Amino acid sequence: MEFLYEYGLFFAKAFTFVIALVIALVAILAVANKQKPTDNGSLELVSLSDGFDDLTQMGKEALLSKEALKKLQKADKKEKKDKKKDTSTEDNKHLFVIDFNGSSMAKEVETLRKEITAVLCIAKEGDEVLVKVESGGGVVHGYGLAASQLKRFKDKGIKLTISIDKVAASGGYMMACVADKVIAAPFAIVGSIGVVAQLPNFNKLLKKNDVDFEMHTAGDFKRTLTLFGENTDEGREKFQQELEEVHVMFKDFVKNNRPDIDIEKVATGEYWYGSKAQELNLVDEIQTSDDFLMQANESFKLYKLKYASKKTLAQKLGLAVSQGVENGIANVITSARNWRV
């Protein structure tokens, strides 16, 4: 009896704490929601060329004698002075660098589209773009939009290079194939030109526990496979048919952007490491983004471009919660029509 009393007291304290915490969160969200939402983000331009110069200078200071360093500094000063007098267009060319680290839901596309728009607004003839893609793929409509956004560079005549240092598979490769040039590290994961969709079905569990589930639709194939209903062979066949149609669209898209590819050979859903991907014409050159940028620094002024959105407190709290949910269950229970590439 004493145990039950102690347990009840503990439970009451815990319940009171939880209620107090919920009330506090509700109060915070109520205040936060009064903040005016804004889309006025900030565009950050960081000079990567200055970063290379700083590293070079630190290396020279560590290795050279004081006398040699003094002579070098004098020569560098003269070189910079001569460059200021030189008005050639080559010295004024820019290479804009954009990072894209894509999630399965491709929510980063919203930032990417603004970064691309920013580049298109400020780029001039001779400027180029490097997009560093890292993604294992995700929903087809999200990555399809990302690829379409990258195509805006080509439509404007701006040379686009995409680098794959770690992974650009499936939807990630859908983005990469748009580029004028694709480079990849030797062990980067490339390819996986395929489509997958999966979902659990709890119908047997519901029946076992005498739980009825009803779903009403208008249209024979408004729903094919469901989470809780009883799936049919007809629905499975239609589901597979739609999956194949998306795969054909994916293959056609890759083939149109990289006509030298033997599409039937590479569109099996497999992935390859960088060196083999080059043999299959999935990439053009084996090179890391670091080496590419070091070489480009000789001809371009390098800038890393990033768009940062301003968020209200409520948006920040909501983002934290949504990320937790996505990491936990969103990849397991999702809509049957969220085809993934």
Image (cartoon, grey):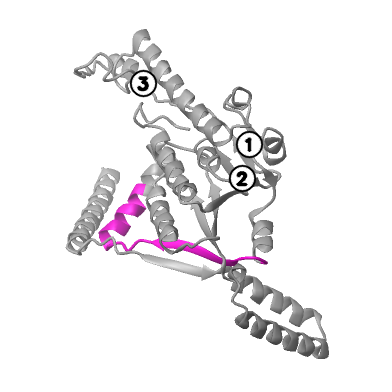
Magenta stretch contains residue 144: no
What's the residue type where badge 1 is placed?
A: Leu
Residue 110 vs 304, above or below: the answer is above
Mark 3 residue element: loop
Magenta segment: 298-322
Query: Closer to the camera, 17 or 52?
Result: 52
Question: For residue 57, which quarter of the picture?
Answer: bottom right
Nearest the eye: 240 or 68? 68
Q: For the image shown, how many numbered marks are present on the structure?
A: 3
- Residue 129 visible in image: yes
Residue linked to disc 2: 182
Give SS at disc 2: strand
Q: Mark 3 points at which residue?
A: 201
**SS of the residue at dot 1?**
loop
Name the side, left or right, on which 131 lies relative to 114.
Answer: right
**Disc with the residue nearer the chain's start (3 vs 2):** 2
Badge 3: residue crowd in 10 Å (few <14, some 14–19, many ≥20) = some
Q: Which mark is drawn over residue 15?
A: none
As displayed, is residue 218 above or below residue 32? above
**Label 1: which residue?**
282
Few, some or many C-alpha atoms within 10 Å of disc 2 (few <14, some 14-19, many ≥20)?
many
Q: Which of marks 1 and 2 is nearer the N terminus?
A: 2
Identify which amino acid the numbered label 3 is placed on. Answer: Asn
**Place of residue 188 in the rendered image (x, y in percent of width and height, measured from the top left):** 65, 43
Q: Residue at x 72, y 34 (%)?
A: 279
**Percent coordinates x, y for residue 218 in the rendering:** 19, 17
- How far is mark 1 from mark 3, CA to CA? 37 Å
Q: Kindly indicate whether the residue at mark 2 contacts the one at mark 1 (C-beta within 8 angstroms).
A: yes
